[in-house]
């Protein structure tokens, strides 16, 4: 809806994310992020939510167990084969 009103007044906002601050408890400021998602929906992220998101992003990738293969994983390299020929056979 804002895009329609903005277009009527000649204002186009293509930002997907806007950062602001708000006062909490009268003496402390908190960072707030307004994020557009799903086309016309807006998500409000406070400092706690942003910190949780950072922790999830920092997580190391999970380890995947690969099932055993039925072939010999080693390749016997002879004198005439180049690296490209060896890797192409995989």
Image: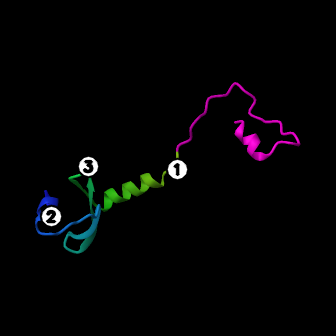
Q: Residue at x 24, y 51 (%)?
A: 39
Magenta highlight range: 62-90
- Closest to the camera, between mark 1 and mark 3, is 3
| Label 3, label 2: how far apart the Cα atoms are | 20 Å
Q: Label 3's element?
A: loop
Q: Is residue 34 above or below residue 86?
A: below
Q: Residue furthest bottom?
A: 27
Mark with earlier residue (1, 3): 3
Depth order, front residue of 30/26: 30
Graded by Cα atoms within 10 Å as few (under 14), some (14 to 19) or many (20 or more), the crowding at tag 1 reads few
Graded by Cα atoms within 10 Å as few (under 14), some (14 to 19) or many (20 or more), the crowding at tag 3 reads few
| Label 1, label 2: how far apart the Cα atoms are | 43 Å
Mark with earlier residue (1, 2): 2
Q: Label 1's element?
A: loop
Q: In which quadrant is the C terminus drawn? A: top right
Name the residue that disc number 2 marks. Answer: 7
Name the residue that disc number 3 marks. Answer: 38
Tell me the tag on residue 60.
1
Q: Residue at x 66, y 28 (%)?
A: 68
Find out whether residue 76 is within the magenta segment: yes
Q: Give the percent coordinates (x, y) of residue 73.
A: 74, 33
Q: Give the percent coordinates (x, y) of residue 20.
A: 25, 69
Q: Label 2's element?
A: helix
| Label 1, label 3: how far apart the Cα atoms are | 28 Å
Q: Residue furthest top?
A: 70
- Closest to the camera, between mark 3 and mark 2, is 2
């Amino acid at each position: 809806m804002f895009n329609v009103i903005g277009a009527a007044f000649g204002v186009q906002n293509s930002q997907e994310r806007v950062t602001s601050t708000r006062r909490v408890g009268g003496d402390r400021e908190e960072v707030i992020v307004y994020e557009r998602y799903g086309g016309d929906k807006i998500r409000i992220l406070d400092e706690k939510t942003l910190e949780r998101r950072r922790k999830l992003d920092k997580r190391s990738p999970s380890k995947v167990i690969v099932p055993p293969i039925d072939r010999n994983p080693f390749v016997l390299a002879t004198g005439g084969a180049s690296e490209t020929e060896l890797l192409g056979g995989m």
